[in-house]
Image (cartoon, rainbow, N blue to C red):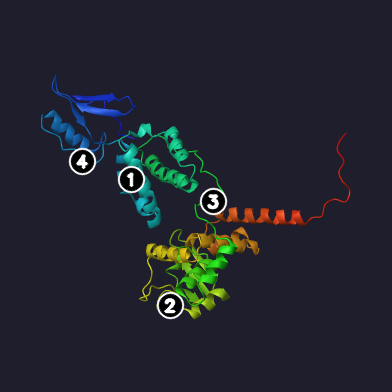
Amino acid sequence: MTAAMPKPRPPHLVRETTRHDQVVWYVRVGQGKRTRMRAPYGSPEFWRDYRLAVEGKPVAAATGPTPGTLSWLIAKYLTTAEWRELKPATRKQRHGFYRAMEKTAGNEPLQAIDRRAILAGRDRRRDTPYAANNFLKSLRGLFRWALDADYVKADPTHGIKLLAGTNEDGFHAWTEEELERFEATWAVGTRQRLAFDLLLFTGLRRGDAVRLGRPHVRNGEFTLRTEKTGMVVVAPILPPLAASIAATATGEMTFLATERGLPFGKESFGNWFGKACREAKCPGSAHGLRKAGARRAVEEGATEAQLNALFGWADGSRESATYTRTANRAKLAREARATPAPSIPVRDQG
């Protein structure tokens, strides 16, 4: 994590270990006062402050988080290429977790953020598995980078499992009754119904659905690179969706448009569509429609590989496996109920 200390040690440099097992450095000339070195050991800033302290001059005023703390590590991470390569939605979500962590444990030394502390944080969120898992993913991304950058000796998130649940991604999947209720409220030709049909019959996330338009369509298929994963999705414009597009006033470049004919932003679309759901007395969301579309696709015989292609999931995705397992169990249960009872009763062992 730090550069190897030269031997012999530079004069007047004192090394101490705190009760949290954190190494700190001081400069003390003779019996004079001790001057704490705040910059990481071996860095140009460290040696600059060392020379100033030896000469009896004030060191540079500390700015930002204390080196070696959780806040300091987060600040470092937010300047990296690894952070910038994350999708904007992922950065926004994880940034929220980091800000919350800094409020409660930002001044803690990195050695104090161990496996036990992370398990406790995950388990405090166990009633909301989606939030618990994203908390863990946020820390996993941070500490995997920190390990590669040699800021920590081990990744404290290693081996900690995500929580399982029937609704791991946190969104309610629309039921068939809810789908029918929305369709009864918003007729074909309304912008609300077009949004519903786009989400249900393409399986796109809302950030992709608001970008989809005629430039993406050719020979009855649309081709779109997804915002979140970067996967290219090629899928047919199904007849119900084609009819909905034809009946609705659309934008010039995107099918979905505001009243002024402008493309929706992802967040503004989410708010607008949420209002449409409430007016239809549906508890669903845009992402819940994506889940309903995946459920329908599996019930109609789609394989895991086909789901991955349609929904932009990576090969071996947990999402597609979850849907196919659920559908297979439901099919087996229906077949079991249809199986006639044995004509000869089974006798008790006696």
Q: Quadrant of residue 220?
A: bottom right
Earlier residue among tags 2 and 3: 3
| CA gap, disc 3 and disc 4 | 43 Å
Residue beneath disc 2: 250
Label 3: which secondary element: loop
| CA gap, disc 2 and disc 1 | 40 Å
147 to the left or right of 23: right
Label 2: which secondary element: loop
Q: Give the quarter of the figure containing the N terminus.
A: top left
Q: Is residue 225 depicted above or below 38 in this figure?
A: below
Label 2 Cα neighbours within 10 Å, binned few <14 / some 14-19 / many ≥20 = many
Q: Amino acid at mark 1?
A: Arg
Q: Amino acid at mark 3?
A: Asn
Q: Give the quarter of the figure containing the C terminus.
A: top right
Q: Amino acid at mark 2?
A: Thr
Residue beneath disc 1: 99
| CA gap, disc 1 and disc 4 | 18 Å
Q: Evaluate if marks 2 and 1 touch, with contact meaning CB atoms under 8 Å apart.
A: no
Q: Position of residue 32 (x, y in %)?
A: 13, 22
Q: Position of residue 34 (x, y in %)?
A: 17, 25
Q: Is residue 97 depicted above or below 213 in this figure?
A: above
Question: Which marked residue is nearer to the observer: mark 1 or mark 3?
Answer: 3
Q: Quadrant of residue 12?
A: top left
Question: Which marked residue is nearer to the observer: mark 3 or mark 4?
Answer: 3
Residue beneath disc 4: 63
91 to the left or right of 26: right
Residue beneath disc 3: 167
Question: Which marked residue is nearer to the observer: mark 1 or mark 4?
Answer: 1
| CA gap, disc 1 and disc 3 | 26 Å
